[in-house]
Image: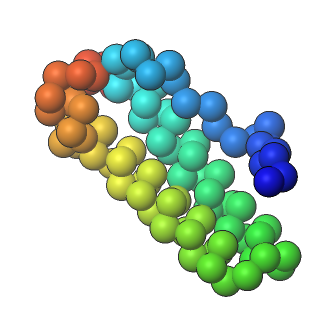
């Protein structure tokens, strides 16, 4: 099976034990923007399924960023992350 190469432009997530809501919000927002712009580029080379997937992922990460700001993200509610925005 061929190895999947990653783009250096893909946002890198914080460490898994990072409890900073601010860092996670930055990651979610950057990943949503990256997926959205990648969908536009991929539309020319790959099929419509790839574009739909990237748009769904962009929406999912955008919703996560919004939940962090509203303090309703499950990890903030459970106390796993601190809300420091």
Estimate the x, y position of residue 31 in percent, counting from the top left. Answer: 57, 46
Farthest residue, direction left: 78
Q: What residue appears at the point 52 percent right and 59 percent down from the top-left corner?
A: 58
56 left or right, relative to 83: right
Farthest residue, direction front: 1
33 left or right, relative to 25: right
Q: Is residue 76 or residue 53 the one in the foreground?
A: 53
Estimate the x, y position of residue 73 in percent, counting from the top left. Answer: 24, 41
Number of numbered markers: 0
Estimate the x, y position of residue 48 in percent, counting from the top left. Answer: 67, 83
Q: What residue appears at the point 28 percent right and 46 percent down from the top-left corner?
A: 67
Residue 69 occupies quadrant: top left
Q: What residue appears at the point 58 percent right and 42 percent down from the top-left corner?
A: 30
Q: Quadrant of the C terminus?
A: top left
Q: Is residue 78 above or below residue 5?
A: above
Q: Is residue 84 above or below residue 59?
A: above
57 left or right, relative to 18: right
Q: Quadrant of the N terminus?
A: bottom right
Q: Is residue 53 above or below residue 35?
A: below
Residue 19 occupies quadrant: top left
Q: Is residue 1 or residue 38 the one in the foreground?
A: 1
Estimate the x, y position of residue 43 in percent, counting from the top left. Answer: 75, 77
Colour scheme of the picture: rainbow
Q: Is residue 46 above or below residue 21?
A: below
């Amino acid at each position: 099976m061929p190895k999947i190469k990653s783009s250096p432009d893909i946002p890198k997530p914080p460490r898994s034990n990072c409890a900073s809501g601010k860092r996670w919000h930055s990651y979610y927002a950057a990943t949503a923007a990256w997926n959205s712009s990648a969908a536009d580029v991929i539309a020319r080379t790959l099929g419509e399924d790839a574009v739909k997937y990237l748009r769904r992922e962009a929406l999912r990460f955008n919703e996560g960023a919004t939940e962090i700001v509203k303090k309703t993200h499950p990890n903030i509610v459970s106390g796993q992350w601190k809300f420091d925005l």
